[in-house]
Structure formats: C-alpha cells, structure tokens
Amino acid sequence: MLRLELQDISKQYPAVKANDRVSLRVKPGEIHAVLGENGAGKSTLMKMIYGAVRPDEGVIRWNGEVVDIRNPHEARALGISMVFQHFSLFDTLTVAENVWLGLDKSLSLKQVTARIVEVAAAYGLDVAPSRPVHTLSVGERQRVEIVRALMTKPQLLILDEPTSVLTPQAVEKLFVVLRQLASEGCSILYISHKLDEIRSLCHHCTVLRGGKVTGEVDPTQETNASLSRMMIGAEPPALRHRESSPGGTVLQVKGLSLPKLDQFGTTLDNIWLQVAEGEIVGIAGVSGNGQQELMAALSGEDPRAPEESVRLFGKAIGQKTPRQRREAGLHFVPEERLGRGAVPSLALSQNTLLTRTHAVSPRGWIDTGAVVSLAKQLIQGFNVKAGGPASPAKSLSGGNLQKFIVGREIDARPKLLIVSQPTWGVDVGAAAQIRASLLALRDGGCAVLVVSEELDELFEVSDRLMVIAKGRLSASIPTREATRAQIGEWMSGLWDGHGTNDPTRNVSHAPT
C-alpha cells in the first residue's frame, strides 16, 4: 500500500498556474525528492498535502483512503508534519511556546520543554527551549522547525529546503536522522536544490517544471548535470573566477568589541577586518556565532559600535544610520528575506523603496512610474518569476524573492556590498546567476563581503576566507590555499593563535 498518492492535482492563482495535473506516489519508508527550479510549484504542492492550501482539482489518497485535508491541524492528526522554507514561528514567543502551539494540549509547557531537550539531544540539533524566537538566527530557526516536526512522530515528514542554512556537519547529522526515520517506516518528501544531497539521500525523485511533472528518476543513477537538465532544461553556466587585483581599502573594522544585546546573543570580541576594492571576502561559521551581530554593526542596524571602529573609505561610520551608510555606498542584503529584506504584504515595486530613494523627491513625493519601472527592470534583469511589479513579496517563491532583493541592491551600484546567505533556498540556475553577479560586481571594482554557511559557495566566489566562531574572527586565508577540512576545523573555534588580536593577519590582500 502507498503512504501517499496524489492524482492530477491542480492549483490556479490569478497570475500563474502553480500546479497542473501533478501526480506523485510515495511508499512507506521512502525518501522521495521533489526537484524543480524556483517557481516550479514544489512548495504549493507540499502546502496542499499539509492542508495549508486547498487544491482546485485532483485527489489525495492517504494510506489508500481518499482524504480532504482542510487545514494543517487535520494533516497533523493524520500523521503529516512539515518544515517550511519560510518559517512559521511567532517571534515574540519562546521556542518551547512555539512548539507547544502545534502539539496535543494534553502536554504541559514544562513537559514540552523537557521533550524538546530530549529530541534535540537525540538528533544532534542544538535548540534552547527558553529562547525567544526573535533572538534566533535563520539557521537556529531552521533547527526549531525540524525539532517541532520530529516531536509529532510523523508518518510523513515534508522538508522544504531543510539544509539551506545548516553547516555541512549539521547536514550529515540530519541525514543520519532522516535515514533512521525512513528505516522505521516514516516517509519523507524532500525538497532541495542541492543536487548532491538528493543523489546521496533520496530513493526516488519527481521533477517539476512550470507546475508540471517532467520526469521521475532514481537519483542515485543520475549525475548533477542530468538532474540539472531535467530541472531547468540546461546545465547552469560555469562561473569564471579570475584572479583579483584588489585596490584600496574600502571597509576597515578595527578592534570592534560589542557586548551582546540580550542573554541569548553573542558578544563580538576584538574583530579586525578589511575588504578592498575588487575583492570578495567570505566569512564562514556555524549559525549563531556572531554573524547577526557583526552584520548589524556593519549595516548600521546596531549603532553602538565606537565611531572609529568601523571605517568606510577611511571615514568613521561606526554610529552612522543605515541610510547614511547607503548614501556613502554601502548596501546590505540581510539573511532573512521576509520581514527584513522585504515587507511581505507590499508590492515588489513598493519594496524597492526600502533601500532605493531614486523615485523620492526632496519633499517626499514618490514617482510611482519610476518605482514600477525599476521593479520591472529587476524582474526582467534577474529573471524573477512574478506576476509583475504589483505582486506582493509574499506571493513569490523563496528563491525568486531572493533574486529580487539581491538584484535591488546590486542594481544600486554599491561601492561595498555586504550580503548574508546570498543563495539560501535558490535553485542551481538562480544560484549561478547570483554568484556570477557578485563576481561581476567585484570585477567592476566593488568590495564584497559575503557571509554564508554554504562552504561550496564561499569557495566558489571568495578571494579570501575567514571564519567567525563564538564572536571571534579568524585570520584570513587566500581561498586557493584553504581546504574544507581546515575551514571546518576553524568553525569550531580552533585556529592557530594570531587571528583576532593581530590586525596584520587580516590585511585585505596580503598573503596570510
């Protein structure tokens, strides 16, 4: 008997047909991949299985019986759990309170808290039940979602980009968990753009393109190239990464130390950093080790830094506002798309105004024509799949919204671009486009600082690499001299001595 069977499922939205007569079958204990480029209809399909969206047509069978799943509560009662790509957590509540909301109320909050600790320890996921969600990084929120799903002991676990912000070590631990669950009979629907993951983990793969099923394969018998061709119709273009010739110093951070803002934050400890014209510096690290705090200090969201500790083109900006920094040439892409990179309910055209003032007169009048024109330009130039400039940000798939936000900041022609998790949840074709755009910026003389938990990404685009651990920043190393094993060791805070306290170890382009 099949665990789950979808037959001719369709879903129409005003601007797009998200799913067009999709059929899919999942066996008990099977890890089944759903592969497709951004906007192919994967997330919509998963939401229909979970009851968050109602299909327009088609039949869903659960353990051989036709079912009408009207909401997530009914899905959970059947034994279906889902980890969303865009997290469904309440920022003002603690981790334990968020988990408690989705569980049987026969358990007390104290019991749920104890159970979270047990599950997190059993599966190697570091989660603190008492932490308010608003203090968590994206990677930490991902862990909460996974623990919450595992606590329901599901018969079917749906994972939408579960490793997009996890470190390689955490991914390996998660795979052990998923294989264990599958061996116990749990079925898993696995959405990922990481082709290596699908080939190593999954038993079967259904490929979607434009809302339709274009193929079903055994991923273990495929190559990355063959899967990519099925998904996007071609192989992603190879990046051309030439040797850089850095110019003068653009960003200089000198001995930056900042106490944490709350008990769950990370204290920044004597950070030294330089980024020059025409180079990309990558910072690796396990989520929650000070990345958020460093980005806030550099972007101006946290203005507590001593004025002289952060310099842009030699001018002290440690206490300047984000707008003042943008006017000086610093643009920033935050790791969290919805809520920080974009306002979910606002149109794409209106979201350009968050960081672009080209259409605003000195008296505050907004040129709506110019706003719409820019949105159209970004949609076309960065191949964003959207209904148009009037589409709300929340209506886009995660990858397409990421392309729009990154495009908005690149199009501003920054002198310094700081970007956190640039290709989180983005398909291979779009990831290649974003990375190529970063390299083009660098080649045009822009200084680029990339913070990512994707080591492959950092090795692909960076000229120099550094690691942040427990609020301390390592020495830099030329990417060509670094190894993944070495960077992985540094991510545990194990580097050999000098790094943080010796500014000569972090000069912008001298060998270290």
Image (cartoon, rainbow, N blue to C red):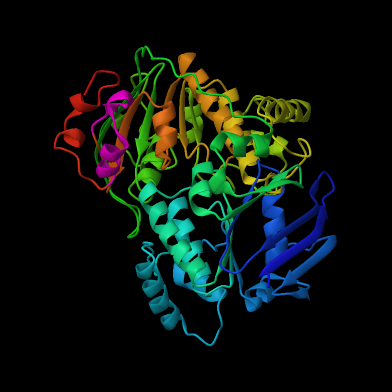
Residues 9 and 490: in front is 9
Q: Is residue 322 left or right of residue 285?
A: right
Q: In the displayed structure, would residue 274 be above or below residue 457? A: above
Residues 78 and 278: in front is 78
Q: In the displayed structure, would residue 499 be above or below residue 192? A: above
Q: Is residue 55 left or right of residue 90?
A: right
Query: What range of the chain is rendered magenta?
Result: 475-491
Q: In the displayed structure, would residue 99 be above or below residue 488? A: below
Q: In the image as oriented, which residue stretches furthest toward the bottom?
A: 106
Residue 24 visible in the picture? yes
- Residue 420 x %, y %: 46, 38
Q: Is residue 125 left or right of residue 67?
A: left
Residue visible at 70% across and 43% down? 39
In the picture, the quarter occupied by the N terminus is: bottom right
Residue visible at 27% across and 28% down? 477
Residue 504 lies in quadrant: top left
Q: Is residue 490 magenta?
A: yes
Residue visible at 38% across and 58% down? 173
Residues 78 and 183: in front is 183
Residue 83 visible in the picture? no
Q: Is residue 476 left or right of residue 174?
A: left
- Residue 387 x %, y %: 78, 39
Counting labels gives: 0
- Residue 372 x %, y %: 76, 30
Q: In the image as oriented, which residue stretches furthest toward the left?
A: 497
Q: In the image as oriented, which residue stretches furthest toward the front?
A: 221
Q: In the displayed structure, would residue 231 be above or below residue 235? A: below
- Residue 471 x %, y %: 28, 46
In the picture, the quarter occupied by the C terminus is: top left
Q: Is residue 209 magenta?
A: no
